Image: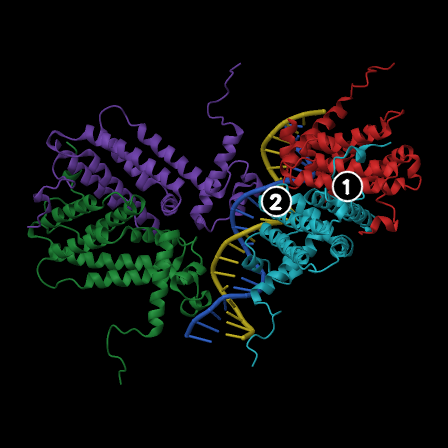
Chain colours: A red, B cyan, C green, D purple, E blue, F yellow
Amino acid sequence: MSAVPLPARLDPAEERRGRILDAAERCFVRGGFHRTTMQDVAAEAQMSPGNLYRYFPSKDAIVAGLAERDRAAVAEDFSALPAGADLFGAFEALARRHLCDTPADKAVLCLEMWSEATRNPAMAAICRDFEREISGRLAGIFRDARGPAAAGLDPEALARLVLAMADGIMVRRALAPDAPPGPAVDALLAIVAAALAGRFDPTGAAPSNRDTA
Amino acid sequence: MSAVPLPARLDPAEERRGRILDAAERCFVRGGFHRTTMQDVAAEAQMSPGNLYRYFPSKDAIVAGLAERDRAAVAEDFSALPAGADLFGAFEALARRHLCDTPADKAVLCLEMWSEATRNPAMAAICRDFEREISGRLAGIFRDARGPAAAGLDPEALARLVLAMADGIMVRRALAPDAPPGPAVDALLAIVAAALAGRFDPTGAAPSNRDTA
Amino acid sequence: MSAVPLPARLDPAEERRGRILDAAERCFVRGGFHRTTMQDVAAEAQMSPGNLYRYFPSKDAIVAGLAERDRAAVAEDFSALPAGADLFGAFEALARRHLCDTPADKAVLCLEMWSEATRNPAMAAICRDFEREISGRLAGIFRDARGPAAAGLDPEALARLVLAMADGIMVRRALAPDAPPGPAVDALLAIVAAALAGRFDPTGAAPSNRDTA
Amino acid sequence: MSAVPLPARLDPAEERRGRILDAAERCFVRGGFHRTTMQDVAAEAQMSPGNLYRYFPSKDAIVAGLAERDRAAVAEDFSALPAGADLFGAFEALARRHLCDTPADKAVLCLEMWSEATRNPAMAAICRDFEREISGRLAGIFRDARGPAAAGLDPEALARLVLAMADGIMVRRALAPDAPPGPAVDALLAIVAAALAGRFDPTGAAPSNRDTA
DNA sequence: GATGAATGAGATTTCATTCAT
DNA sequence: TATGAATGAAATCTCATTCAT
């Protein structure tokens, strides 16, 4: 029955789509979505412009496809968490992988897609889904990882804060590719660690947190 | 009698430039930089397309002008700090004004400009200058505002962290205009307050900050 | 009665027209008719663009005015011939003045005006008039200057030949400003001299003129 | 069977380029380079405006292409001289073909290109090359064709004179298309014949040539 | 008379998309 | 399936000309 049971074997159409997305990603990073022409993408993908339309109905669909692929990849990365013990360690690894190890080009692409999402409803929907999914998974991690002293911690609020910080770090990477993202990621991890340990809760409205004196 | 009629009276050319920037801002927020045509801007500014070119040499120059105007406004806002006592209060006011009170459209424009900055060197320079200026001012505030227990705090590092968080909050506002920015700003303020009070330093590499247990 | 009897005193409008033509000439030589804008001419004439239209109804009218002025100047130059003896000497002087001494810019302007004349009927008419006038005067000179041995010479035909050669010399000056026009003008003069002396008639259909052997 | 169908078969791209140049030539003659729009050329070539840009990168490139094609055609015409005897006859045929038989429109186009050459360096280079090539070939012809009595003749100087006269004839054809070019060409041939025969050298500085008496 | 800001039609060029082969 | 020539709508920018001041 099963002709090719190997999971790595994609059907040719899927392989073509992937090739196009790879090419488009390189082009968009290099010149931005609007400045990249379909000819550019076709040349980079080593096919004819007309052929692109067999796999994607429009240029917009390519960005959408790109975003969706990223979304799926990150989601898979998050779902592959070790079931076992060191949840914070797993979180730290995820954060470092996505915010530090990923090349700065990804950050540029990210900005490009966000900017597109501010008016392309399809892109906006993908971004929203993405955010909801990651947010949910982070909240799950935080809920399970918080220590006894952090019973009052709101995992959803912390997840939202982490996402916002992550976005900010992406912006900085895109705009200042030479500045190392390490310190900011360290700070993010420090904040999460403190919150999970119950030492300091940035999302709490506790007045003690807001006093300077 | 009075030779100088009113200090608010701008020379007509300056008034025109302002009118064009206002129009462009509305258009860019509505449709993005690349999808906005010069005709759109002209119509919004109630002029003929040709006349735009008397005041700005190109479409790019309009975005640059817009960015520069914003930069100047924010910088002026930051420099008008009360000389006196409540530095943290002043910082809080600034943060709330720029991150909460400002309409969500500004955030959209911001994303647009960042995305442009990844390719347009002029835009990149404006963003870099802006970041450097604000960063410097924030560091100054933090240096003066830190309490005795926070002697080890690095004001520059904290300023960088705050900027990254602010950028992240902007991104979230642009992408999810319905989600209130308040909680994230509260968290940002809480973190700064704790750092200034010496209660918790997210930028310190102190191992205690990074331990989960 | 006569307020200002001096011939050098132009009425102010005439002076303005002259100033505009001077400016236009400089501009056209520099950049060609089509690449020169009315703003360019106005700036060069040190007046406002709108003011140009008080003196010339259109841009085309300026080229026409320029051509007409040139025509008048050359015609005047030709009519100021010494009534007396040395007609060939006078012709030689005219030829050298117009083909050698005149700056190469004039040749460029000439080409510009010819090219314009191929489709602007007003310009074409001016060029035709010009040609007819000069041709007539040259023929008159040649008729009076031919020696006894040149009784069979056709002064009109020689004039047409001279005009064509003069045009060719202008073209060469415009295209190769560095090549000295002297030799070509010398040849032109030599041909005319020979024809007037009856030594060699290039316009005659005499078979002897056409044999190689 | 026959592998190569016909030598006249051009590859389709070359055919397209030729079609565009033909169309452009008709348009430029009709309205001049600057007044002809790309839409005009496209309509004349029966293509869409955008398609022109697949074959020529700009409007300027079309004029350049036109000039180059003309140059190549004329150069080829000149190089196809009969190896054998009647060199002057060959020269006469060339002169008549290019100066009389060619339609007057070509002369208009020529003026157009010269006028462009005064500003457009690419065009200027083409004209210069053309002139150098033709000049060289003419000098070669004259060197071989001069009779024993014309040993002192400078072939290069004569070639330059002939080129200038030819240019002048072109100008006259463009400006007065109704005046037949025959007489002027006859005169040109008579002058060359006389020079080659040693009867009269217009390029020589011999005083006898310049005396009127 | 003179200014120069404003107009608006139009030019060149680009590019997403289609379709005959 | 794949190609790549072709389309044609649209975008940016220019400039001759006008007109209120």
Which quadrant of the view contains residue B103? bottom right
> Please, is residue B142 above or below residue C57 in the view?
above
Q: Tell me which chain the residue with mark 1 is part of.
A: B
Looking at the image, tell me whether mark 1 or mark 2 is earlier in sequence order: 2
Disc 1 residue type (three-letter): Asp
Report the side of A132 relative to D171 (left or right). right
User: Is residue A50 toward the left or the right of residue A208 in the image?
Assistant: left
Q: How crowded is mark 2: few (under 14 residues within 10 Å), some or many (20 or more)?
A: many
Q: Where is residue E19 in the image (x, y as percent from the top left)?
A: 68, 35
How far from the left and from the top, in percent, is residue A120?
Answer: 75, 44
Left or right relative to C37: residue B101: right
Residue identifier under label 2: B124
Residue B100 x/y as whole percent: 78, 54
Residue carrying label 1? B201
Towards the viewer: A162 or D162: A162
Q: Which of B20 and E7 is in front in this view?
A: B20
Q: Report the amino acid beneath label 2.
A: Ala
Say above or below: A199 vs C66: above
Q: Could you tell me which secondary element the residue under label 2 belongs to?
A: helix
Asked whether residue A119 appears in the rendered view, the answer is no
